[in-house]
Image: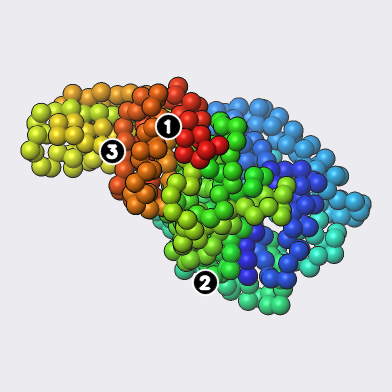
Amino acid sequence: MKIMKFGGTSVGKPERMHDVARLVTRGDEPVIVVLSALSGTTNTLVSIGDALLAGDKSKAAEIIVKLELHYKQFIQDLLKEEAMRAKATAVISEHFEFLNIILKISFNEALNKDILAQGELMSTKMFCIYLEEQGVDHVFLPALEFMSIDSHDEPQVPVIREKIMQLLAQHSGKKMFVTQGYICRNARGEVDNLKRGGSDYSASLIAAAVKASVCEIWTDIDGMHNNDPRVVNKTVAIDRLSFDEAAELAYFGAKILHPASIWPAQMYQIPVKLLNTMQPEAKGTLIEVESGAQGVKAVAAKDGIIVVRIKSSRMLLAYGFLRKIFEVFEKYRTPIDMITTSEVAVSLTIDNGTHLQEIIRELEPFGEVEVLTDQTIIAIVGDQMAASKIILADLFKALTDIPVGMVSFGATPHNVSILIESKHKVQALQLLNSGIFGL
Ligand code: ASP
Ligand code: MG
């Protein structure tokens, strides 16, 4: 069994959905197809919820009308036979009826989750009707019957496994299953989701649950690249990465893969392939336990970083100081990314400034607190970086002209992170591209 997951842009146009159908029917191996919502739909559903939260029902109604028109047109271009078009129109109308009913009742967070689920429900149903029109035998596998999160909003692979295996057993001999990414049920049995971009996570959880041979993530780029293609001119796709390397890159800004989707695949040792629907023959990136080659594979940048620096001579020879500082961040549920220490100061970075003022207030008794905003972390990721003595030399030589604020190295053999002001990001990524990758 293999998993093939397609993102919003891969199903966002009728002709792209036709391509997806061609791709999933190519091989002999049984496949579970995991689909996102059509591109733009989840954002639109978010804006419906926002309008309702603000009490603006007429705005919500307006957005719903526009979205429905989009789907009606989509159906016309997706399907050829009148009977199939009528069937799809009836199915989609039910979802819009549901959205219109929500307009009439009092809005709450659980309903909002129901609204957000409509995108994946509609995309998978339309895709199945297209498969039907094409005469492709398939099974519609509702994610809400097997994908779940526990009371801490965490998915548990063994729980998902039990449910999905039961469902699959009801369809033995079938070779194609179609299901939704992103959506799930929570511990209260309500419709919920795996957070924005969570379809990759669904795919990896399903892959782990069914012990798939591979988890293919299909997007519109040919794999993970060595640098950010939006910032530098020339980038190349990386052939192979280890799970650890991929996790660093996904977290530090490589938008192609949701960071949470690494752990299920890693834990259950399911290889992940990043492939391109526009260029299905391209090799893409293979992510597995072994990393392939040593040395630097890629750099990735994460913007919106805030540095908090606490300086205190009381830190000198003191113990328990770091614990007290960390406790403040824990109290405000603010994760710390990078940390460097000197004998009298600690610098750390966060990417969520929601509770910054409270955090500063509680840190002030420990010493002088300084805050820097508009910072960027650049992660330089690879395998056995310490073993290759030239890496650090090359890195800092490449960045001679860039003021570096913090450096973190040695926590894992896979990563060197540096902090710079965001205004230097473009130049820094370009310099690293030529200095390290020779591009
Ligand atoms: N449709 C959801 C989103 O846009 C999930 C996904 O596409 O991964 O966030
Ligand atoms: Mg995505």
Q: Is residue 110 above or below residue 399?
A: below
Q: Residue at x 78, y 57 (%)?
A: 22
Closer-to-camera residue (350/127)? 350
Q: Which amino acid, mark 3? A: Ile
Q: Quadrant of residue 419?
A: top left
Mark closer to the chain start, 1 or 3: 3
Image quadrant containing the N terminus: bottom right
Q: Quadrant of the C terminus?
A: top right
On screen, 119 above or below 155? above
The residue lying toward the viewer, choosing from 281 and 163, is 281
Q: CA distance from mark 1 to mark 2?
A: 52 Å
Q: Is mark 2 within 8 Å of ligand 1?
A: no
| Image coordinates for residue 79, horizontal then vertical, percent | 86, 51
Q: Is residue 309 left or right of residue 297?
A: left
Q: Which residue is mark 2?
A: 162
Callout 2, which amino acid? Glu
